[in-house]
Amino acid sequence: MKQKFKRKKELVDQKEEKEEIDKNYEETINSEIEKVKEEKSEENSWTSENEETASSESKEKGSSKSSTSETSSEEKEAKEAKENKEQELKQRKQLEKIIVEANYLKNSGKFEEYEKKIIEGLATVDANNLELNKMLADFYFTNGNYQKALSLLKKITERDPKDHKSIWQIGEIYFINGDNETAELLIEKAINLRPDSPKYNLSMVEIYYNTNRINEAIACMEKIIRLRPTNTNYMLTIAELYEEVKDLQNAKKYYFNVLEYEPTNDKAKKKIKELSEN
């Protein structure tokens, strides 16, 4: 049972190295973003020059026609508001296009291109865009690149303190690195924000189990079963926990429950036989 919850503790969060790791990563990302900006700037330089020329010509014509009058402050404000709205709409369309393209690359298994596309979006749309930062952080977390993920996730939770997924992911990283106390606080916070998440509660079961609080782990698993009453993997897990505390009656109950949904489950059959012989 211990192997079920025991995780490999990676030393990526050591206090002596952490600040330098985060600093180097931020410098790398900023460098990549600047590189993309320079490339985009070169691509758009010809267009920008033409737009400036056209704008200059338009201003000259307008000046010759209305040299004796000034634009009112109300008209200027209305014009600025319109321009800002148009710019926001343009930016939103750019963001949607990048997200669609990025998800296509991800679904096609082109993960390196997926990462580059998101970084391109951060450079060309908004380096602080939450949606893109969440996508990049989730990509790093899912692929086990916890150093990069942690740096982004902390920035995300600073701007959105109720982002339960990011809080849970930070807690998971601390748990993997062996900081059970910090992990528990974070995962408890994520559960409070999203109490109906089996995934978050299962993380708490792992923490309880690895800190020798098996009865609390069982109570948490009971909650998970209530959330997902037909999940046989959860049933097998809680049955094994009951076996560890020698509560064979409840263990057998959950093994029988497994067979109600999966009549051919060999593990449940074997366990019921073993428990019946004892």
Image (spheres, rainbow, N blue to C red):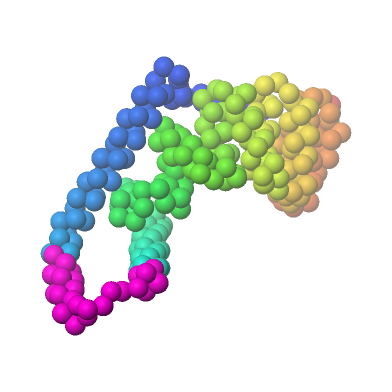
How many callouts does the rendering have?
0
Question: The N terminus appears in which quarter of the rendering?
Answer: top right
Magenta span: predominant SS is helix
Give the residue drawn at x 84%, y 28%: 247
Q: Residue furthest right?
A: 249
Give left or right: position of 155 versus 186: left
Residue closest to the eye, 144 or 34? 34
The quadrant in which residue 95 appears is bottom left
The quadrant in which residue 41 appears is bottom left
Give left or right: position of 135 versus 32: right
Give left or right: position of 191 versus 141: right
| Any part of residue 246 in sight | yes
Q: Residue furthest top?
A: 16
Residue closest to the eye, 276 or 74? 74
Task: Please say if 175 is above or below 119.
Answer: above
Task: Please say if 101 is above or below 273.
Answer: below
Residue 32 locus on image (x, y percent): 26, 43
Task: Please say if 79 is above or below 114.
Answer: below
Residue closest to the eye, 186 or 125? 125
Q: Which residues are magenta?
A: 49-77
Give the residue drawn at x 51%, y 25%: 177
